[in-house]
């Protein structure tokens, strides 16, 4: 039997594996009662990120419960904004709030470069490595476009009115901001790799809100810079709503891409295989509300349809939500492991 980290590293290097490695987005989080208990100790989410020993504790919780092959560093994509001097608070039932959003050229003049501000995340990386030496470890950053969406909007916004106003009325300012965030994320991504992460995921949660041309210009171009700057270290790109953009995303030649459930799996897998790109996805996390038998049927039906491919990592197409039942998550992981994989 392969060790989880060996399985994970082999997968990243396109080497033989006994079965695909398994990890889930937001595998640490509010659906786990032990997460809520640790979060209470920290008193709020931000303190939980800043306290490396508690952050390590919650990163390890899903590994203790489920047979997962990799941990994901516990932090938030918006910690980079704070490092740049943009104050972020996380409010219950609202999400992240930025009291002084970036809306004008002058607002960009105060932005700080990333040096050692995110040391608390790097300490978490070191602790996770120490406590889970035989599992893979995944670091992450937000895409510059997605970080800019929060910096400019000041909160979750489906319409993205303020950033689109900037894009159409004052693109120079937007470019200034996104360039700054690109430098910041490249520095931080390199720091995470140096601290011990095996690969990086770029979360582009709002890229799917742009038309294909604007997506290329304002989101993908900066993700491509990250991919280049990190080489030879593996980077996975995850744009939520990537379906219309997938060809362009694959043209960056990142090590891998993650897709959500609106993206057709079989077709995307063929496109990825033609380019030697790893694929992760794309089950709808909501299907974990089905019965165990139905969950198994959904998974096996999909896996039978695509056949066994060693460059495919079966997983959920987005993060686990707070209302989901941890036992269903466990069932999902076991069902994936039990599938009759033939990957040679
Ligand atoms: O297990 C993991 O996935 C690691 C940790 C992680 C968190 N956020 C912790 C978190 C990761 C990888 C993220 C990424 C993240 N953060 C994204 C990209 C992925 C996505 O969901 O689209 C985005 C857009 C954010 C920004 C953010 N952080 C929002 C919008 C929110 C509030 C909404 C929500 O889901 O609660 C957060 C808070 C947050 N980040 C929580 C967690 C566990 C919930 C905090 C809590 O305990 O109250």
Image (cartoon, rainbow, N blue to C red):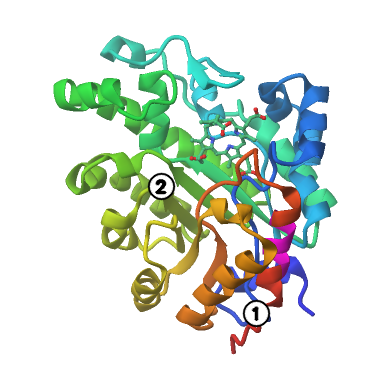
What mark, if any, has residue 204 been given in the picture? none
Q: Is residue 46 magenta?
A: no
Q: Ligand 1 lies in which image quarter? A: top right
Residue at horizontal 39 percent and vertical 54 percent from the top:
228
Vertical relation: 299 (above or below) 119: below
- Residue 340 appears left or right of 106: right
Q: Please state the horizontal and vertical placement of residue 193, each as a whole percent of the image.
A: 60, 50
Q: In the rendered image, is residue 131 in sight?
A: yes
Q: Is residue 330 magenta?
A: yes
Residue at horizontal 18 percent and vertical 21 percent from the top:
170
Quadrant (top left, top right, bottom left, bottom right) of the N terminus:
bottom right
Q: From the Cβ of disc 2, is ligand 1 less than 8 Å away?
A: yes
Secondary structure mostly taken by the magenta-highlighted segment of the chain: helix
Find numbered disc 1 in the image and state the secondary structure of the residue it sits on: loop
Give 112 or 329, whichever is nearer the viewer.
329
Q: Please state the horizontal and vertical placement of residue 292, each as a whole percent of the image.
A: 69, 64
Residue at horizontal 68 percent and vertical 25 percent from the top:
45
Q: Please state the horizontal and vertical placement of residue 16, each as a whole percent of the image.
A: 62, 82
Count neighbours of disc 1 (C-alpha within 10 A) and say few if under 14, some if 14 to 19, many if 20 or more: many
Q: Toward which corner of the image does residue 103 lie, by quadrant?
A: top left
Tell me the residue that label 2 is attached to: 240
What mark, if any, has residue 17 been given in the picture? 1
Q: In the rendered image, is residue 69 in sight?
A: no
Give 256 or 205, whichever is nearer the viewer.
205
Find numbered disc 2 in the image and state the secondary structure of the residue it sits on: loop
Q: Please state the horizontal and vertical placement of residue 59, each as a whole percent of the image.
A: 74, 44
Vertical relation: 142 (above or below) 231: above
Q: Which callout, 2 or 1, points at the residue further toward the start of the chain?
A: 1
- Residue 70 appears left or right of 183: right
Residue bounds of the magenta highlight? 329-334
Which is in the foreground here, disc 2 or disc 1? 2
């Amino acid at each position: 039997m392969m060790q989880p980290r060996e399985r994970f590293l082999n997968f990243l290097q396109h080497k033989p594996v006994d079965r695909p490695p398994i990890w889930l987005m937001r595998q640490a989080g509010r659906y786990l009662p032990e997460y809520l208990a640790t979060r209470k100790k920290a008193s709020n989410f931000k303190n939980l990120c800043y306290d490396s020993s508690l952050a390590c504790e919650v990163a390890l919780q899903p590994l203790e419960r489920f047979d997962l092959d990799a941990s994901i560093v516990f932090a938030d994509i918006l910690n980079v904004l704070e490092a740049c001097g943009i104050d972020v608070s996380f409010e219950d039932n609202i999400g992240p709030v930025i009291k002084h959003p970036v809306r004008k050229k002058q607002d960009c003049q105060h932005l700080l470069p990333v040096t050692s501000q995110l040391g608390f995340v790097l300490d978490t990386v070191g602790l996770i490595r120490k406590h889970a030496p035989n599992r893979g470890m995944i670091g992450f950053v937000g895409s510059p476009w997605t970080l800019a969406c929060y910096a400019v909007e000041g909160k979750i916004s489906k319409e993205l009115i303020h950033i689109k106003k900037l894009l159409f009325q004052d693109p120079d300012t937007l470019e200034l901001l996104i360039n700054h965030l690109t430098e910041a994320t490249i520095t931080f991504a390199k720091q995470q790799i140096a601290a011990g992460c095996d690969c990086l995921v770029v979360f582009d949660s709002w890229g799917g809100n742009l038309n294909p041309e604007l997506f290329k210009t304002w989101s993908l171009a900066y993700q491509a810079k990250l991919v280049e700057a990190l080489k030879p270290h593996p980077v996975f790109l995850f744009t939520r709503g990537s379906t219309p953009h997938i060809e362009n995303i694959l043209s960056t030649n990142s090590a891998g891409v993650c897709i959500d459930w609106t993206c057709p799996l079989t077709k995307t897998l063929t496109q990825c295989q033609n380019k030697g790109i790893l694929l992760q996805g794309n089950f709808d996390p909501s299907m974990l509300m089905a019965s165990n038998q139905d969950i198994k049927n959904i998974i096996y039906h999909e896996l039978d349809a695509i056949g066994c491919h060693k460059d495919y990592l079966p997983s959920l197409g987005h993060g686990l939500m707070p209302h989901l039942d941890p036992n269903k998550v466990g069932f999902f992981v076991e069902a994936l492991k039990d599938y009759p994989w033939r990957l040679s």
